[in-house]
């Protein structure tokens, strides 16, 4: 059995942001301690309003080598691309 605490991935939502972004990783024995440690390590300048922590072992990711088969089907769906639609001038920069 490993004596090392589990690895947690930390996501912070900034003062002016709407979404959380990955800011780093840390080791902690449980989720509560991971949140507390993340607060101390990643929000020292009061830049966050929300913290998410996720055990690294609970994350499933695609491999870069699967890029083609995974993303190529979307190329045939041109209606999903923003260039397919006309944006009215009054909308401004999006």
Image (cartoon, rainbow, N blue to C red):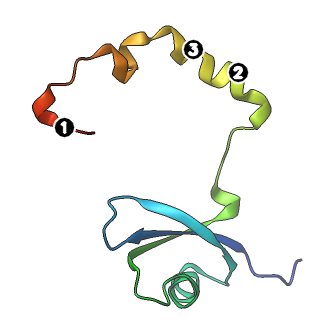
**Whole-number angstrom distance, CA of label 3 to CA of label 2:** 9 Å
Instruction: Report which quarter residue 70 is drawn in.
Output: top right
> Is residue 74 shown above or below 55?
above
Q: Earlier in the sequence, mark 2 or mark 1?
A: 2
Q: Residue furthest left?
A: 90
**Relative to 1, residue 83 above or below:** above
Circle 1 is placed at which residue position? 92
Task: Identify the image quadrant of the C terminus.
Answer: top left
| N-term mark: 1 or 3 | 3
- For the N terminus, the quadrant is bottom right
Q: Which mark is residue 73?
A: 3
Packing grade of label 1 (10 A; few <14, some 14-19, many >=20) is few
Q: Which residue is mark 2?
A: 68
Question: Contact, CB < 8 Å: mark 1 with mark 3?
Answer: no
Q: Return the x and y of residue 76 as percentages of the image width and height.
A: 51, 8
- Is residue 22 depicted above or below 35 in this figure? above
For label 1, the SS is loop
Packing grade of label 2 (10 A; few <14, some 14-19, many >=20) is: few
Q: CA distance from mark 2 to mark 1?
A: 34 Å
């Amino acid at each position: 059995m490993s004596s090392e605490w589990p690895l947690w991935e930390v996501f912070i939502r900034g003062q002016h942001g709407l979404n959380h972004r990955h800011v780093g990783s840390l080791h902690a024995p449980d989720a509560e301690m991971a949140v507390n440690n993340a607060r101390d390590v990643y929000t020292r300048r009061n830049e966050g309003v929300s913290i998410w922590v996720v055990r690294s072992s609970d994350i499933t990711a695609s491999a870069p080598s699967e890029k083609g088969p995974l993303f190529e089907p979307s190329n045939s769906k041109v209606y999903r691309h923003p260039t397919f639609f006309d944006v009215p001038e009054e909308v401004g920069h999006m």
